[in-house]
Amino acid sequence: MGAIKKSFEIILNSNKEESRIAARQIRKLLYSSRKDQSEFDDIRIVVDGAFGEYYKITEDWRQENFVMAISVIYYLHDKNNSPDFLFLWFLQLLQHQNGYIRHAAVKMIADELGPLTVHIRFPGDKRFSKENLISKKADEILFFLFVNLHNLFSVWWLPKYRKYKYINSLPASPYKSIQMVLAEMEDMCGTEYLNDF
């Protein structure tokens, strides 16, 4: 069993302190010099099963450790095979009461926005056409994300947020996390593109 897969076993099955330590070691393991194809295969297996595993977890602290560890390795999933396969889960995580989990969800969505918006940022550039989705599929995913984020925006908005001028000054909340993703989308897509939705 590879080191990363073993760490996820500890996260999911050990006591609180061992789980916390294993979650924080994922980054170190990922960037260690010893890597072979089986490690990357293990990462893909863990990411592909993340949604199902998360809902088996009953302890809040274990959910936090699991999501934080997934956010470290998430960018290594198979991007050409349904890059939005976890977006419904991410939208749920954006509403979690735990700020670490919300932050991890913001990070994972932001990781996906780069490849999804290449056709917008570099229209007609042949260098990116082989590595990225067909622009129509990417547009559909971006539209889905945009609509769902705005739906969540309206659910979590409170009148007290009127007094805040900047996203960074908002109090930690699902509303702030949703705003952070929307701001990242606007940066990556541009306001003209989003206005067409």
Image (cartoon, rainbow, N blue to C red):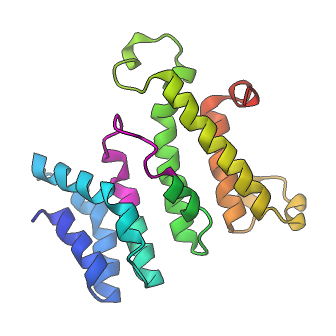
- What residue is shown at x 43% (from left), y 83% (from top)? 58
Which of the 4 image quadrants contains residue 193? top right
Q: Residue at x 54, y 62 (%)?
A: 103
> In this orientation, which residue lies closer to the viewer: 121 or 59?
59
Looking at the rendered structure, the number of numbered marks drawn on it comes to 0
Furthest-bottom residue in this view: 15
**In the drawing, does residue 127 fall left or right of residue 99?**
left
Specify the quadrant that holds the N terminus. Answer: bottom left
Vertical position of residue 173 compared to residue 127: above or below: below
Depicted 92 relative to depicted 40: above or below: below
Q: Is residue 27 magenta?
A: no
Could you tell me if residue 55 is visible in this image? yes
Return the x and y of residue 170 as percentages of the image width and height. Answer: 76, 62
> Which residue is at the front of the view, 160 or 56?
56
Which residues, given as a range, are shown in magenta?
A: 70-87
- Quarter of the image for residue 161 reads bottom right
